[in-house]
Image (tube, grey):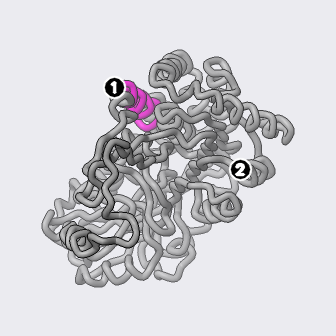
Amino acid sequence: MILTNTPAARIEALTAEQRAFFATGTTRDISFRKQQLRALQSALQKWEKPLCDALWTDLHKSYEEAFMTEIGLVFGEISDALKHVGKWARRRKRPTPLTGIPSSSYIIREPLGCTLIVSPWNYPVQLLLSPLVGAIAAGCTAILKPSPYVPNVSDTLQKMIEDSFDSKYIAVVQGNREVNAQLFDTRFDLVFFTGSPALGKKVMEAQAKYLTPLVLELGGKSPCIVDKDADIRLAARRIAWGKCLNSGQTCIAPDYLFLHEDIKDTFVEAFKQELASLYPDGTKDAKHYVHIVHDRAFARLTSYLKDGKVLAGGRSDAATRWIEPTLLGGVSPDAPVMQEEIFGPIFPVMTFKERSEVEKFVCSREKPLAFYYFGKKTDGWDILSRTTSGGACINDVIMHIANSKIPFGGVGNSGMGNYHSERSFLAFSHERSVLVTPTAIDLKFRYMPYGMFKLVKKMLLLG
């Protein structure tokens, strides 16, 4: 399937219609927001099978993996928002300092307005609809732009949205880089973009002239460290699972391995065994092993195999875009495989003797989206205190994204802003400060010639 670009005139009309609809104030009503969240919930129930079928067609993603990593997470976000949106949107009274007496202070959370959500191809359902939950809960309108690299999924998403919402409120536009360029050149009240750091910079540059607030969920080379006192078998199992999930095409996939030199050989053997346990018949024809998204990505990934010595795996098939999970040893830090986010099932392996070597290496590079450490918990906390990343796990990988009670987002080159649960609501909201002052009392200390200056100064110093 080849998607047709949404005409430029249609995009202009949609943005104008959504601005006009937002201006009516309809979306500000909490009952309206709940109604629309229920509409999204019903739509997802109705379109679950077509979406899963499309994910299989485009990515060879099994129903089980599709539900756990895509649809199920969106259901969870909707349920959470329905329970709490009234509380999230409630006016909050805040303390007023002595110098502000007799005024009262408040925070009101208001919708930012007309928003754009651009999602990638690797988790095309979750990464489009999870932010949409935040937009609906906050009272915004949204134009959704899915990825053309998963055309069947993107087409199904468009049909689902058109079946469930008026386009003046929520609409889908399709297309390639030309459509992206037009969208990024259009004024929005928020742009929520998930993709590569390179494209994220283009979004930021294009929207800079409007001073548009952005949420950028990018990526990077997320390190995975296995120390000498780690539970090697458990580490191998969890790391193999994390790297095989979506065939490594995950923004928070462990990107490269740092193994303590004392346990390197033991870990490699354990990795092979755990991989065989996950896929007893191999990954080539496995139902639960996703294939690479397109030929260009396949060519890029297989080119990395020459950057080191294959310690495990290494086979591939261009016809089905299958790449076997691969450990690659003898890798130079300057090799191509160590320069860009891999986004595939290839694992460069380096070794270390002291944790300080790892800390120095990680801190010398761009800030990653995730950081994984296997070993003693106290040592994990110690290395986290000396490094930075968007998120992290100690003795696990990936799973921090599954907890909506903690924020998910990047830092530096791996992104800005965060979301999930109330954070999604806040991402699409403006916290507006309000001071309410009575008219019956008018204290003179703030007026010239500041006759009570010494007292005011004392109050300010005391806080």
Residue for badge 1: 83
Above or below, 387 relative to 19: below
- For the residues labelled 2 and 1, the Cα–Cα distance comes to 32 Å
Main SS of the magenta part reads helix
Which span of residues is magenta-colored? Answer: 68-83
Task: Tell me, yes or no, whether the highlighted magenta stretch contains residue 73.
Answer: yes
Quarter placement of the C terminus: bottom left
Residue at figure coordinates x 39%, y 61% from the top left: 390
Report the side of 24 relative to 408 (left or right): right
Q: Residues within 10 Å of mark 1 (few under 14, many from 20)?
A: few
**What is the number of the mark on residue 187?**
2
Above or below, 253 relative to 289: below
Q: How many marks?
A: 2
* Discs 2/1, front: 2
Residue 179 position, x and y percent, is: 78, 47
Q: Residues within 10 Å of mark 2 (few under 14, many from 20)?
A: some
Quarter placement of the N terminus: top right
Task: Tell me, yes or no, whether the highlighted magenta stretch contains residue 114.
Answer: no
Residue at figure coordinates x 70%, y 27% from the top left: 168
Earlier sequence position, callout 2 versus callout 1: 1
Name the residue nearer the viewer: 49 or 453: 453
- Element under disc 1: helix
Residue at figure coordinates x 67%, y 41% from the top left: 145
